Image: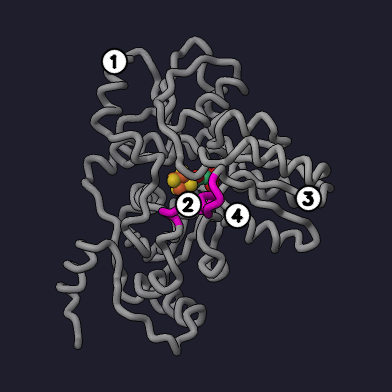
Amino acid sequence: MMVSMQSLRQRVDQIGFVDDPVDLTLDLYEEIELLKKKKNAILLAHYYQEPAIQDVADFIGDSLGLSRQAATTSADIIVFAGVHFMAETAKILSPEKKVILPDLNAGCSLADTCPADEFSEFCDQHPDHLVMSYINCSAGVKARSDIICTSTNAEHLLRMIPESQPVIFAPDRNLGRWLERKTKRKLTIWDGVCIVHETFSERKLLTLKVEHPDAKVLAHPECEEAVLRHADYIGSTSGIRRYAKENDTTSFIIATEEGILHQMRKDSPQKHFIAAPPESGCNCNQCPHMRLNTIEKLFMCMHHELPEITMEESIRRRALKPIERMIEMSEGVS
Ligand code: 13P
Ligand code: SF4
């Protein structure tokens, strides 16, 4: 039965993705490549996406790299294989482009810890503070911020703010505390956390270190301090990838979402990468939000150009300023 575009749109609005069955005889890689050319679309993917999506992407990167790509692309359509706040950031930066996300339900547990209205009240209680927000937040929170940062540039940007200036840092408390330790500066920190990065177990990490005494531990700053204190390197996903590629060590324990291991294994097939274990025996080191996107949903999303990211223009304009400030002030940082 043929579905009209209007009723398809209504259904996607309700459930967040196109749920038509995909023809199993299709080569989805080939089809996606054809759609990219036909529609002048660019496919941006975060490192936490499933390997099949990473393999068909035009650009794979961390939050900063993806924002830079979204700001400068000449494509008409940005297909964002990541989570909602990332696609939203792309729309804020490139409002004239159509930005689509394979599954609109791909949110972020960390961004959800910081509702815009509560955050605004919190900021009102600290009127003398400059507001620095991690990019993992909604457009509403960005609109209330003075500057946005990512894990790649947070330390760099904080050091550019005069020491006498009090700073609110939101929403990730682990990244905030790590910044405090790095810069020896007190911050007023929002109490948010990511369900994936808080799950890593110090106890199991120590056991792994005994089993692999030569392995270096590489961790994302969203991890708890109990994990970070055992790390040989702490940095963003792109920092972790680069460190493993350039370092002479042949064995690494990785404390971040395990999707990143795909590119690391491609970079250095001779090296050994071990995903740091969560406390329970489950797959909790996979982000349940990122993993809502699948290659089938990606194909459907590109075919129908749905679901699309939209937002109120007044919020978009206010959210744009702190993101542009971040991009300008972190030129050359990677
Ligand atoms: P980066 O890729 O910027 O390091 O961020 C990690 C993350 O948790 C994204 O949600
Ligand atoms: Fe959000 Fe954590 Fe998933 Fe990153 S890994 S998108 S911070 S829930």
Q: Give the amino acid at mark 1.
A: Gln
* Residue annotated with mark 1: 125
Q: Please, what is the dominant secondary structure of the magenta stretch? A: loop
Q: Which of marks 3 and 4 is nearer the N terminus?
A: 3
The answer to the question of whether label 1 and label 4 lie on touching residues, with beta carbons closer than 8 A, is: no
Q: What element carries label 4?
A: helix
Residue 30 shown in magenta: no
- Per the rendered image, the range of residues in magenta is 280-290
Q: Earlier in the sequence, mark 1 or mark 2?
A: 1
Q: Give the amino acid at mark 4.
A: Ile
Q: Which of marks 4 and 2 is nearer the N terminus?
A: 4
Residue 264 position, x and y percent, is 68, 56
* Residue annotated with mark 4: 260
Q: Give the amino acid at mark 3.
A: Ser
Near mark 3 (Cα within 10 A), the count class, few <14, some 14-19 or many ≥20, is some
Residue at 73% in and 36% down: 232
